[in-house]
Image: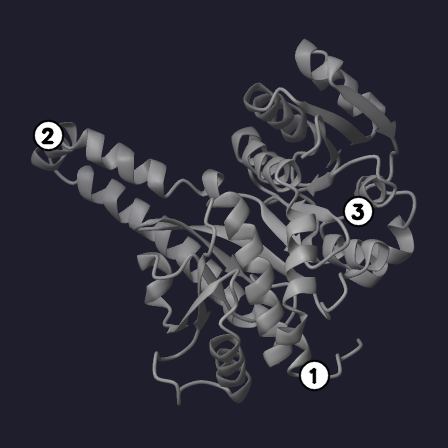
Amino acid sequence: MPSKVRIALDAMGGDAGAAVVIPGAAISLGRHRDTEFLLVGDRAKIEPELDRYPQLKAASTIIHTDVAVSGSDKPSQALRRGRKTSSMWLAIDAVKQGEAHVAVSAGNTGALMAMSRFHLRTLPGIDRPAITGMWPTKRGESVVLDLGATIGGDAHHLVSLALMGAAMASVLLDKKRPTVGLLNIGTEEIKGHEEIRDAGEILRARNLPELDYIGFVEGDGIGKGLADVIVTEGYAGNIALKAAEGTARQMAELLREGMQRSWLSRLGYLFARGAFQALRNKMDPNKSNGGVFLGLNGIVVKSHGGTGAEGFAYAIDVGYEMAHYDLLNKINQMLKREGGALNSVQPAPEDVS
């Protein structure tokens, strides 16, 4: 693990740019004193914010650029317009050049993935990267991937996701042999698409020492925490994520309305305030912020674009943990050891758009 973790921040990404990125970095620095930052963006916007945080200023270097990737840019447009000049590209380039261990951005997701994949390339044995996130459950947290990086996936892709997700769980959840489940429409072996069934057969037959494959998991099993790692392709993963986020917001609104309905309900809230606060903390989206792009020759973390400073700090924390505990090396070692699991099924040709 490095003595200092250097993190490159896209200070122009997200809805608020430096106004959120800088205070978020200050919060994260308070939790991880062995962090150094490369702040990539417009110096005129960064410096006034940075002056408010002397300790952060002492631990930071500014890389100036006034070019930002727009939230409306298509990935191909971002690559053409922002390549080698934008704050997003330069943050990724810092990882490529070894100047930073990880890059964090709240910018355009499609553009960030396109630039990261184009510049960093994928790891040997990985045909497509994945967006990986931490999912709050009844048992704690689970690693879930893919949350929307690529649509569809054959058995080779799903097995590679299982290997990478297990490596991430070993870092973040401190699990020597994390349990892994494949998201499916039923738990029976005959259920689901052929590629899911094939991936399950491979994982069961290989009995990999780095993970414990438990079989298929239905959608409600994610929140129950039935597995430390839940694997799915990006289409289903993104729908599951958005449905869960929407349900959490709806529950919060219904609770708020119910508690304000009468003086009795308001009185009841006073007695149960501690329980409601615990629920609010458990469902706080800020604490689950930070999707890791797995499968690349470098670590890139995507923050929600509309998050506040606290939420952005959690995204930085995720990047810190990935670098501090050498996630990339762990994934590489696992892929080399368990390459037979990937070689046992050939990847399908990838569509090029």
Which is nearer the N-term, disc 3 or disc 1?
3
* Residue occupying the point 63% across, 59% down: 334
Q: CA distance from mark 2 to mark 3?
A: 49 Å
Vertical arrangement, residue 319 with respect to residue 115, above or below? above
Label ID, residue 69? 3
* Residue occupying the point 78% across, 60% down: 75
Drawn side of residue 239 relative to residue 70, left or right? left
| Other-residue count near label 3 (Cα within 10 Å), few / some / many at <14 / 14–19 / ≥20 | many
Q: Amino acid at mark 2?
A: Leu
* Residue occupying the point 40% across, 40% down: 284
Instruction: Give x and y (percent) for residue 147.
Output: 56, 61
Q: Amino acid at mark 3?
A: Val
> Closest to the observer: 83 or 69?
83
Instruction: Give x and y (percent) for residue 28.
Output: 58, 26
Image quarter where the N terminus lies is: top right
Mark 3 near mark 1, Cβ–Cβ under 8 Å? no
Vertical arrangement, residue 226 with respect to residue 280, above or below? below
Mark 2 near mark 3, Cβ–Cβ under 8 Å? no
Mark 2 lies on residue = 267
Drawn side of residue 218 relative to residue 39, left or right? left
Mark 1 lies on residue = 346
Q: Secondary structure at mark 3?
A: loop
Label ID, residue 80? none
Q: CA distance from mark 2 to mark 1?
A: 62 Å
Q: Amino acid at mark 1?
A: Gln
Q: Secondary structure at mark 1?
A: loop
Q: Secondary structure at mark 2?
A: helix
